[in-house]
Amino acid sequence: MSTFQIDFGNTQSQIVGIDLGTTNSLIAVMEPTGPRILSGIVPSVVSVTPAGDVIVGAEAREMLITHPERSVYSVKRLMGRGAADVQEELKLFPFRLTDSTGSVLKLQLGDKVMTPPEVSARILRKLKMDAETELGTPITQAVITVPAYFNDAQRQATKDAGRIAGLDVLRLVNEPTAAALAYGLDKRKEGIVAVYDFGGGTFDISILRLHEGIFEVLATNGDTHLGGDDIDNLLLQIAFEDIQTEWGEDVSAKSDTVQLLRRAVIQAKEQLSFVPSAAIQFEYGGKRYQREISVDVFDRLIQPIVERTLAPCRACIADAGVNVEDINEVVMVGGSTRIPLVRAEVEKLFRARPHTELNPDEVVALGAAVQAGILSGDVQDQLLLDVTPLSLGIETMGGLVSKLIHRNSTIPASATEQFTTAVDGQKNVLIHVVQGERELVKDNRSLARFDLKDLPPMPAGLARIEVRFLIDANGILNVTAKDTRTGKEQSMDVKPSYGLSDQQVEAMILESFEKAQDDFKERQVREARVEADSILAAVKKARNDDAFRSLPTEVRAAIDWDVQVLLRVYNDSDYLLIREKIERLNQSTRALAENMMNTAVRGALKGTKI
Amino acid sequence: MQFYEALGLEPRLALDLEELKNHFYERSRQWHPDRFSRAGADEQQKSLEMTSMLNDAFRTLRDPVARAEYFLEQKGIVSSKHVPPELLEEVFEMNIALEELRAGDESARPHLTDARERFNHMRDEIDHGLSVLFGRYDEAQDASHLLAIRSVLDRRQYVANLIRDVEKELNVHVSN
């Protein structure tokens, strides 16, 4: 017996995996054959054109040279941070802050003011659109990767960026863990694996145990402010000093020269991974600067930066409770691991030749797609057990920290703490939550202040408020409070120390709905241009055909005219206008098309014996 | 004994770590939030509660000392916080040596490194003794064994603090 199988298709939209990187970003999906990168790599650069349009990716990277003060790169280094944290870096960034008082940075780009999550949202939206064009279906759900050592505020900022971009962020995955997923899934590995992830702006080290499809992170460590950018800055300083001496000119103050020079040093740095010597070459205002740098000099220069990755590695090995000899493999992730000195130092520390056969730029996005597959149920038998990178604590008497959840605890992780009042009739209890390993509050990262409010008046010490701290699978803190005498939920106000409030995010989402309209238009324009390209190409080709030559003069003139008209509106942003002109050309070439069809049929018949 | 129940284990003090790990992995596969990303809010909440409990349970039970502390706490047996009398003299001498080293007297260092070695040895012996006591309690289920374990744990905590103090001081002055 045969039956008809009707495939309604997957009613759930596909979950994508996104690597939102410091330098470049990528988007990938899980397919039956494995994870696949969609569209191309998108440089993590956002610019505001003089006309006020926001552009993203390769185009924006060009703007970085022509209009540096309107462009942002490495915005990841600003996520979830306050003005005081980034003073040093801002000296090298071409853009300025509008004010440095609030809990979130505000960047002045042309006449637009954008927060880091909004800038990241632009990159995410670009990835989303590119992927939608390629897949032909809308994308609403995503897994986004973050450095393992990101704190709560940095994670929250990434999640906010997703929401602003119109994405439901189902999970934040740690980048080294994602890399391990892509790596382990492929090779069906068992045993203990270290992932050394040295990217554009962040460094992570994670040690995992792989066992029957379970990826258990044993420990993680890192530095969210250490990466290839820092190497670029060292080379930049050398070039600045050279040029100061040679030209008697300080080019570090001009943002356009800084960006040109940055591009030149990055080129030299990348070459040095493959050749023994490379030159920083730079021309400006008719003057030329060239500086040859040998690998020896380069190695000596970056040695302190590479050293800074080794201490977290040693701490991570100790925290994982393993010996170096127990580690079966070391996986290298991130562009900076192409540097031979980095590979040599890692090999020395782990006493094992690091794996470099994976594309260090793509493996994180591929792993994010695997995690997306786990969440959708497409990938069975694999499970990721990750940890929180930093201890969570609350402020106690004398500015000391009382730790509630220790670093490297498997997440989700929770802790409950009882609170009461100290004086009669006290109405509020304030709880200050911090993240970090130090004993004093001031040496840790402030997360938020929770105000348990509207307590009923009663004698001191009688109130019984149970507060539950829960770090979810994204590594983000959730806090709930309960009055244990009444069993009722205790109301509280939350003041995050860094980042956007919920209201701010809501407002940005609303605004992005309007932007979604623009996105829709932009896609329509793109599609109209693709269509115009194809008809223009067809007409051009037909000009050499007998069918064209046999057309009456006035018909040929009409075609020429309509081609010119279409070419003139081709770059217009009004897709309806482009479509209208395509239709015109369609009409005027109808006779041509018929002629060609007849010729083709005749040609076909000629070769056929009847 | 919530932690044992969560992992589907009998409440015993002596645990086979391999079995514990397998139970943890198996239950994690079942309850992890990854399995509920498209489920309703209630189910997601349940999964979150269950996995955070599983993680807590596994972290506590895999460490013999944390496990015993949890077990005794569940049985309502509290710590006495007394200084073990047999250690009084030793601690007294060690404190003098610590004072001397703090004052810059390097001649106190050998005494302290010796003390550290003795305490480390003491801790190892205590740990060995604990595992014997664990077995005895599991066999007999007698509360008097729990009291014995309590006093051993208190002694262990005390020794651990001494080791921490000595190490801290030895490290601080290492460059002097």
Image: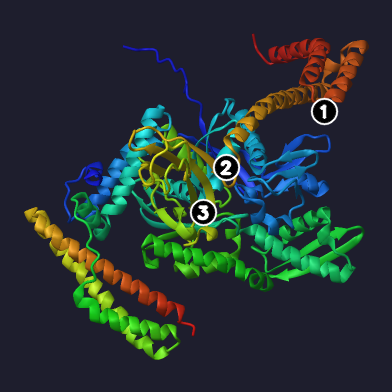
- Residue A230 position by quadrant: bottom right
| Residue A328 image offset from top left, x and y in percent | 39, 61
Which of the two labelled residues, at mark 1 and mark 3, occupies the earlier sequence position? 3
Q: Amino acid at mark 2?
A: Thr
User: Which three-letter amino acid code belongs to the residue tagged 3?
Assistant: Tyr
Q: Residue at x 66, y 44 (%)?
A: A116
Please tell me the numbered disc located at residue A571. Answer: 1
Q: Callout 1: helix, strand or loop? A: loop
**Apparent side of residue A104 relative to residue A376 in the rendered image (left or right):** right
> Would you say A19 lies left or right of A410 here?
right
Same chain for the residues under marks 3 and 2 in the image: yes
Residue most extreme to the bottom: B107
Q: Nearer the viewer, residue B96 or A332?
A: B96
Q: A126 left or right of B99?
A: right
Whole-Å distance between the Cαs marked 3 and 2? 13 Å
Q: Is residue A374 left or right of residue A109?
A: left
Where disc 2 sits, the SS reads helix
Find disc 2 in the rendering and name its residue. Answer: A158
Seen at 82% across and 25% down, the residue is: A572
Q: Chain of mark 2?
A: A
B112, above or below B165, in the image: below
The total of numbered circles placed on residues is: 3
